[in-house]
Each structure stands twice: as structure tokens, then as C-alpha cells.
Amino acid sequence: MLTDFPSDRCTTNLSLIGPKVEGLRETFAAGHTKNIEWRIAQLEQIKKLVLVHQDEILAALQKDLGRCDMESWTAELGGVVSEVEHTVKHLKKWMKPRHVSTPIVAQPGKSYVLPEPLGTVLIIGAWNYPLLLVLGPLIAAISAGNCALIKPSELSPNTSALMAQQIPKYLDQQAVVVVEGAVDETSELLQNQFDHIIYTGGEVVGKIVMRAAAEFLTPVTLELGGKSPCIVDSNTDLEVTASRIVWSKFMNAGQTCVAPDYVLVEKSFAPQLIEAIKVKIEAFYSANIAKSDDYGRIVNARHFSRLITYLDGQNIVFGGDSDADSSYIQPTIVLDPALNSPLMEQEIFGPILPIITLENIQQAVPFVSKRAKPLSLYLYTKNKDFEQTVLQQTSAGMVGVNDGFMFATNPNLPFGGVGNSGMGAYHGKTGFDNFSHLKTVMKRSFWFDVPLRYPPFTSKKFKILKKLL
């Protein structure tokens, strides 16, 4: 039983979930999702859905997260549209057999890898980017020729309801199904067999999903997050660095899985960095941040309370104001929190930025390396040697050098974690491959069938085989 989510009004009758899954399996078995024309038509319909209903989607996101339209378009709608366009452009090439060389022992013959769809994919979305984190995996799953069952997050109820209403109008209802709900519905879904599951969220539920998948030996993609470090060298462009840290940290009020979770900086350089970050916060959101139309809100009271408790007893050097009625928490900077405090042991997922000071920036490498592998790591430096040291001696799902999570805008780069921050990846061709089985094929001629490999075996045959193999 899942325990991480509260119940919600948006539900699907539990008795209908099994038949829905079985219906998808029957659709896949019929074979029409394998057709490239079908795949492209469905992808174009996803794009059409977003563009036709963009005003409704933006309004739903504003209700769920208090997010302004430009931020929502940049972070979600625009990403869906560009991902569709990239996928449609390259899909024919991705679907082609991938020829590889054939060793002499298998000549005459040819060898290739043939992508084939897995079957039925379960997509369990997240509340912080409730459109992107459902439609992004859906684009990948459909491009690979799969059926899909979508479970949007109940913590973004307006966006969830909108998708449940509109997706059946635009996509093949026999191949794509939406199930709304919370704990009970998700638990029931996990009692069914899928051919792949992708879950975006926290580590606790990620483990539950993986245990359920293990009952059917179902492969999983887990996008989990973690405490993403941001290393700032004193040899950097201070103004640009501050701008990019503030943008990537406080977008969506800090509720982003790839947001920098904490900053590592030399003690002597910390005052300059903190001052630059303060200046940029007010430049972006005004001196009266609570009135800014460009700054979001915390998703619900539970997460609001969680974040407020993180500030107990901390050395707050900027911000700290909050308002429970409007779910507002001011962008907040905390200097040198205790490393065993909840602020440094838990993923923050909110607008609180701890700054940890070090005697020497080289200490940042062991600081990061002895902790759980993060989803992302950020480094700001002009020192190429230090850049290489960080890249070679730390591990993270993704790395941004001299910027925030701009890597997410490149469909040619995989998006995914490592270790505790997740497994598997998607975006672009990586997503197509993730939801495909790359089937090995070798085709040989009947001509020139050398009896060397067949019994009876002789010492002469053995000598020749050792040379060939």
C-alpha cells in the first residue's frame, strides 16, 4: 500500500482498472501501434492538445502551483511541443534496423539491432510539473510504439482533471488511458502487469513501485531527485552565476527535482556570493516578493509545514517570511546549517537555499562524493582543471557547468538519475530506446556451411576454432 500521498476527490472505480489494463494489452497485441503513421499521428495530437488548450492548461497550473504563465510555458508546455517536434523529425531514423559488423566466424551473414515496442507502459506522474512529467514520458512511449496508462498526480488536481478530460478526445482511446486517483488507485494499478513502469517522485514511493514491479519482473524507470549540489568557485562570473542560481533554484518556488539543493563555496568568497544572490532575488521578484506575479506557491499545507520546520533554529541571512493562508514562503538563504539537520539530510524541494562554506573549494569534491549520488550537479567556474576534477571525481545523473538545468532543453541529452536519484532515462532517442526492446538479429546464408563447429571434434578443429574465436 502506498503511504506517501493523501486521498483526493479525483478517482477511478477500482474495479475498472484491471479491465482497462487488459484492454490496452489487447490493443497492443492487435499490432496497430507499431505502425509509424499511427505513432506520428498520436504525437501530433499531443502537440495539438497542448496548443489548442494552452490557456486552460496555464490556468490549471496556476491554480495548482500559483505559477505564472511564462514560467509554465517555459518549463512545461513549450517542452512538450519541442519534444514532439524533435521526435516526429527523427522517428523514422530511430525505428530503422541498426546494422553492426559480423565476425568472420559467422560469415556469410549480417547482424543488426531491431527496435521493437515493449507493450503497455504505466506512467505515474509528479505534481510539481504535472503536465510535462506525464506527457514527456508519453511521447517517448508512443514513439516506441507502446500503449500507455497515465496516472497523473492527485496533488495537482486541476491539471489532472484537465488531462483526464482532454486526452481521450485527442488520442486513441484504445491505446492511451488516463486513471485519476491517489493511494488506492495507484496501489491497484501496481497489482497489474505492465511491460514498463516510469515513476517520477520521491525515493520512498520509488521503492514501493520497484517492489511491485519485481512481482512481474517489469523493468522500471525511476526519476527520484535527491540533494543536488551547486559548487561555486571564486574564479567565476559572479553576476551571471548569481542570476543562474536564483533562476534555477526559485523557479516553481523551488519545487523542481533538478533545482540546486545547496551551495558549496569558499568561506572567503561566500559574502560576495550571498550578496549577489540577494540582489538577483529582488531584481527578479521585486522587494515585495509576496506580491510578485512571477513567483509561485507551495503546492499544499503539508509541504508548507514541512518546509517551515526546516527553518527552525537556522541562521537565516535572507528571507524567511511566510504566509500559510496563501502557501507563500519567501526565497530564503540559510548559512552553514548543521550537516545532520533535516535541511541537509532531506531533499528540500522548496525555496530554501543552504550555503555551506569551505576553507578551500577543493573540499567540495569529497563533500559531494561521500553522499548519495544526486540527480544533478552544478559547477560554476572558469578553471578548466577544477572543472575536470569535479567531472571525473564526482557522480551525478546530469551535470550543468556554468548554468542551471539547461541540459533539460536538449533532447539529444538523456534525462535521468544514478544510484539513489533514479535509474533509466528518457528524452529524444534515449526515451525511444528506453521504451523499446533492442532486439538482436543475425541472418546467415545457407551457403558455405563450414562443418568446423559440428561434432565429431578433433584436435585440428580445436586449433582452428581457437584462432577464429
Image: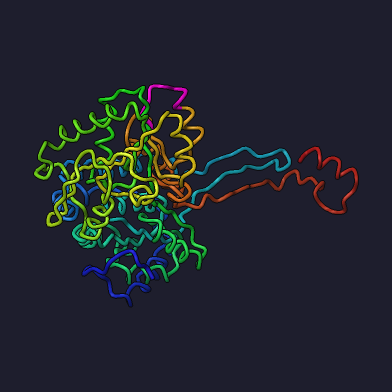
Give percent across and percent down for residue 149.
35, 62
In the displayed image of the protein, which residue is found farthest to the front? 313
- The quarter in which the C terminus is drawn is top right
Q: In the rendering, at what x and y percent does residue 466 appear?
A: 81, 41
Seen from this angle, which residue lies furthest bottom? 15
The reply to whether residue 231 is visible in this rendering is yes
Which stretch is magenta? 379-387
Does residue 52 appear in this view? no
The mark tally for this picture is 0
The quarter holding residue 186 reads: bottom left
Decide whether residue 336 is among the magenta residues: no
> Vertically, is 29 above or below 89?
below
- The quarter in which the N terminus is drawn is bottom left
* Viewer-side residue, 406 vs 144: 406
Where is residue 11? Give x, y as percent: 25, 70
Taking the spot 36% from the left edge, 60% from the top edge, the residue there is: 148
Q: Nearer the viewer, residue 81 or 224?
A: 224
Query: What is the residue that sits farthest to the right in this orientation?
Result: 459
Expressed as whole percent of the image width and height from the top left, the position of residue 201 reads 35, 55
In this orientation, which residue lies closer to the viewer: 122 or 313? Answer: 313
Residue 271 drawn above or below residue 258: above
Does 215 sit left or right of 154 as displayed?
A: right
Q: Residue at x 9, y 44 (%)?
A: 291
Determine the image quadrant of residue 278.
top left
User: In the image shown, does 251 or 59 lie closer to the viewer?
Assistant: 251
Left or right side of 45 for 339: right
Residue at image location 31% in from the left, 41% down from the top: 354
The image quadrant that residue 175 belongs to is bottom left
